[in-house]
Amino acid sequence: MHRTAFVWDDKYLNYSFPGDHPFKSIRESRAKKYMEERGFFHVVEMVKPDEPDESLLLSVHSADYVDFVKSMSVLGEGLLDYGDTPAFKGVYESALIRVMGSVTGVRLLSRGFDHAVNVGGGLHHAQRRSASGFCVFNDVAIAALEGKKYFNKVAIVDVDGHHGDGTQALLYDDPDVLKISLHMYHRGFFPGSGDVNETGEGEGKGYTVNVPLPPGTGDDAYLYTFENVVLPLLQRFRPNLIIIQEGGDSHFDDPLVELKLSTRGYLSLIRKLHEFSHSQGNGKILLLGGGGYNYDATARTWVVSVAELAGIEEQEVESLHDCCLTSSSPFVMERVKEVVKRVKEVHGIP
């Protein structure tokens, strides 16, 4: 068993956009319910986030933007970006507590936990001066900076269906944080960034890695990419902390993304990162949530991943799995191999 913390506060559930907006906190509550039903919390320790600390937001966000969110939180209406991220009463407090969950996870890892989980985190689109893509504050970048205080070298592996553009922009010149994002990419798909040639700037040149995947990428092609890009890069960088952004919208049944990962495919990715962290480093992993608009598939994905990290027997979560691994068409597999070849050439991967 690996000592694993599940960072949770019921206030997470307040971060749920009104009306027919696709981002709903039912994902987080359902994941917790599945864990409770299976007795996870006899093994996994539930921990409340530390007290809110606004200064953490200022490590990546401008003071003007933080003040803007505060004012919109009181007003309770309007937009925090160009249209995807509406304000609601209490949005500032509900976003900040999720940031604190991710920061608390890092701190727990520095105090003896092997792994920490914050399914309320993973809000990787938020930019320095604006919200974006349902994300108000970028807890991924904030957690990475917090992680540098204790672990020096941090790797972010982002498997959300959308490019982690905010995280990339906020840490683009940082050579101590390796940023790897695997995401669907084609003309007109949000957020429109994340091509292979986006590699960082200044001292951070080469420490941003983008793997733009075509629609229809299944478990087989995704795992091929992991073996040929992600693991070699981690072996070269040798991080002391791995932050995983596990957005559930790469699942084959997600209504907003056209990738084809199954819960079994997701588990294979987490298992590979888990094994790497213990064989090549100190085993420290922070698992975050992210997107995911098939709420049940997302919750199931997160729970089977927590079970892997905590050393809970596979049969305890078998009922949450999709039936089988998915396959890519020959056409898609060839396109993925072309992408992998480009990434390897750009980043000097043998």
Image (tube, rainbow, N blue to C red):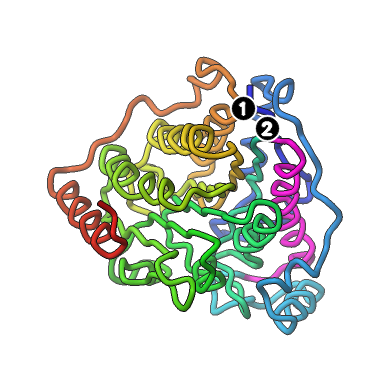
- Tell me where the magenta segment starts and ends, as one range: 86-113
Residue 55, position in %: x, y?
A: 80, 70
Residue placed most toward the observer, 27 or 95: 95
Residue drawn at x 55%, y 62% is 176
**99 or 81, nearer to the observer:** 99
State left or right for residue 40 relative to residue 342. Answer: right
Above or below 201: residue 281: above
**Residue 103 shown in magenta:** yes
Q: Which mark is residue 4?
A: 2
Q: Amino acid at mark 2?
A: Thr
Ranked by sequence position, the earlier of labels 2 and 1 is: 2
Along the line of sight, the residue nearer the viewer: 9 or 240:
240
Q: Position of residue 306 (x, y in %)?
A: 58, 32
Percent across and percent down for residue 244 are 53, 47
Residue pictured at 64% horizontal, 37% vertical = 115
Inter-mark Cα distance, 2 to 1: 6 Å
Q: Residues within 10 Å of mark 2 (few under 14, many from 20)?
A: many
> On the image, which quarter does residue 34 sit in?
top right
Residue picked out by circle 1: 310
Q: Residue at x 39, y 61 (%)?
A: 209
Q: Could you say which disc has been placed on residue 294 in the image?
A: none
Answer whether residue 125 is magenta in the image.
Answer: no
Q: Amino acid at mark 1?
A: Ala
Q: Residue at x 71, y 35 (%)?
A: 113
Q: Residue 343 appears in which quarter of the rendering?
A: bottom left
SS under mark 2: strand
Asked which quadrant contains residue 311, the reply is: top right
Q: Is residue 164 above or below residue 245?
A: below
Q: Are marks 2 and 1 in contact (CB under 8 Å)?
A: yes
Is 224 placed above or below 145 here? above
180 on left or right of 136: left
